[in-house]
Amino acid sequence: MSVRKALHLIAAAVVAFVVIVPVATAAEASESTMVTFSQPVEISGKVLPAGNYWFVLVGDAFNRNLVRVYSEDRSTVYLTELTINTQHQDRAADTNVTFAERGSSQPDALLEWRVAGQTVGHEFQYSKSERQELALARNTTATAHHSGL
């Protein structure tokens, strides 16, 4: 086999690998998660009533900061929010959502969503005054169901 033919085969294998790998991981890349709230929850200034919602990471492999929240049947988009990636030392054992618990006059605020097996979470953004208020609130973390759908 000539050197030229060998180089062509190697180049074809590399191209095939680069094309196949993103397709194979596309379902996992969305980090789709069904979350059920038993009471209203605030996310970045928007209040969602109690119910079932899909949290989905949207965008491409280079922009992993956009989270979209859908209705249970995925027919309605409730919000699309730019988040900040939060780095954790350990991989999450389960898919988690972290809340700031507030008084009974306001719904709890969703602070972060992190999928099982990931070291990176998605932190939701709030206004400066809300951030100051939420910094004083007690945080709790709950487990959510992860689905590759």
Image (cartoon, grey):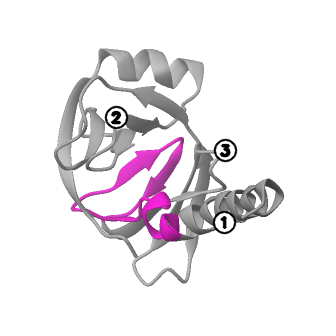
Closer to the chain start, of discs 3 and 1, is 1
Residue 19 - label: 1
The residue that appears at 41% across and 65% down in the rendered structure is: 32
Q: Position of residue 10 (x, y in %)?
A: 68, 57
User: What whole-number distance in Å separates the C-alpha atoms at marks 2 and 1?
Assistant: 25 Å
Callout 1, which amino acid? Answer: Val
The residue that appears at 56% across and 77% down in the rendered structure is: 76
Q: Quadrant of the N terminus?
A: bottom right
Q: Which residues are magenta?
A: 24-50
Callout 2, which amino acid? Answer: Thr
Q: Quadrant of the C terminus?
A: bottom left
Q: Which residue is mark 3?
A: 62
Q: Which residue is mark 2?
A: 119
Q: Secondary structure at mark 2?
A: loop
Q: Considering depth in this image, is 113 or 132 the residue closer to the camera?
A: 113
Q: Secondary structure at mark 1?
A: helix
Q: Secondary structure at mark 3?
A: loop
Rendered view: 54 above or below 106: below
The residue that appears at 36% across and 17% down in the rendered structure is: 135
**Residue 8 falls in which quadrant of the image?**
bottom right
Callout 3, which amino acid? Answer: Phe
